[in-house]
Amino acid sequence: MTHPHDGYLDVGPLSPTRIVATAGGFIALVGVTASFTGIELPTVMAEEAKDLRRTVARATRLAGIVTGGLYAVSAWALMIATGPRNIQAAARTHGPQLIFDLVTPYLLAPLVQLGQLLFLTSLFAAALAFHATAARYLFALGREGVLPGWLGKTSRHTGAPARASLTHSLIAATALAGYVAAGWRDPLTHLLFWGTVAGGFGVLILRLPARWRGSATAPTHPPPPPLLSLSDQEGRIPVRNHPATAVQPGLGIRQATPADLDQITATLVDAFLDTPDARWLIPDRDARHTVYPRLCAALAGYTLRKGRIDIAGDGRA
């Protein structure tokens, strides 16, 4: 950007009107959409988050801002260096080497080589991140019964979705084998570009309103019964699925404090761990026993900070 091709910084390429002003604008929009599909990774990994609400929201926003900023500045810098009218021709001539050829006259050779090495490692990191995300999707779909249930099983030793990971690896290997068998020589055109465009187009379709897609709305499920139900006449607070657990008259009800978080978490886990909805959400009980304490602790902690929880005097309900 310090050596603009036209002698000045042209901000024209940053105008959103360029998307619809060119014949390939829609394809570019699809490609941009596909480029942002990885920012949902914090949500995919939400089960491992210590602070479910705060951490996931912050990480998703940060990923969108950083990714969008890097994309915009990098693309703009390339156009500044080559000139907006010459960027397509330069990209065809130099290919992935374009960015390094542009900076070679101004940087030492070791720095350029270091940039090429970092470029290769970043591609590997990106591929690994996509693999992890795809494996998580297969795992979640298998766990919820959309795909075969064996995909929703985790490794007993690591807790990772090993079956989903191996399945995605097999799919990727099959795609690469088909690519080689077809005799294609340009992976950026035949494999990466068209695969990205097809995936991005699918993401755009999924984001359309249901009435535009012509599909029925998702089935609604009845709301679960309340966790606690008060009865002023009898002074009892039965816990869901534990009707025998009740506050004896005279113990009283008090507002919970952060010191009660462990007891509240244990009560919630005990009440919800083996409910039908819990078994549907996470069929494996060992996995459920790992996830639910974190989930209940996060929900109870958030409610203590932002709202109010009333418990029995002895903290058992």
Image (tube, helix red, strand yellow):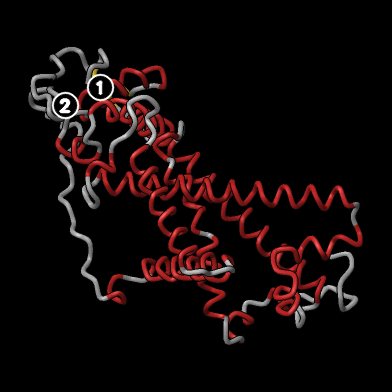
Residue type at the position of mark 2: Val
Relative to residue 126, is residue 165 drawn left or right? Answer: left
What residue did someone put label 2 on?
239
Q: Are marks 1 and 2 in contact (CB under 8 Å)?
A: yes
Q: What residue is shown at x 45% (from left), y 35% (from top)?
A: 49
Q: What residue is shown at x 50% (from left), y 72% (from top)?
A: 30
Q: Closest to the observer: 118 or 259?
A: 118
Q: In the rendered picture of this protein, how many numbered marks are placed on residues? A: 2
Q: Position of residue 103 (x, y in %)?
A: 85, 61
Q: Label 1's element?
A: helix
Label 2: few (<14), some (14–19) or many (≥20) C-alpha neighbours in 10 Å: many
Residue type at the position of mark 1: Thr
Q: Closest to the observer: 217 or 271?
A: 217
Q: What residue is shown at x 57% (from left), y 65% (from top)?
A: 187
Q: Does 42 sit above or below residue 28? A: above
For the residues labelled 1 and 2, the Cα–Cα distance comes to: 9 Å
Q: Which of the two discs, 1 and 2, labels the residue nearer the N terminus?
A: 2
Q: Does 226 sit above or below residue 125? A: above
Q: Closest to the observer: 31 or 171?
A: 171
Q: What residue is shown at x 38% (from left), y 71% (from top)?
A: 205
Q: Does 305 sit above or below residue 187? A: above
Q: Position of residue 96 (x, y in %)?
A: 70, 64
Q: Which mark is residue 22?
A: none
Q: Label 2's element?
A: loop
Q: Position of residue 34 (x, y in %)?
A: 50, 64
What residue did someone put label 1 on?
267
> Where is residue 312, by image quadrant?
top left
Look at the image and tell me in which quarter the C terminus lies.
Answer: top left
Q: Does 287 sit above or below residue 44? A: above
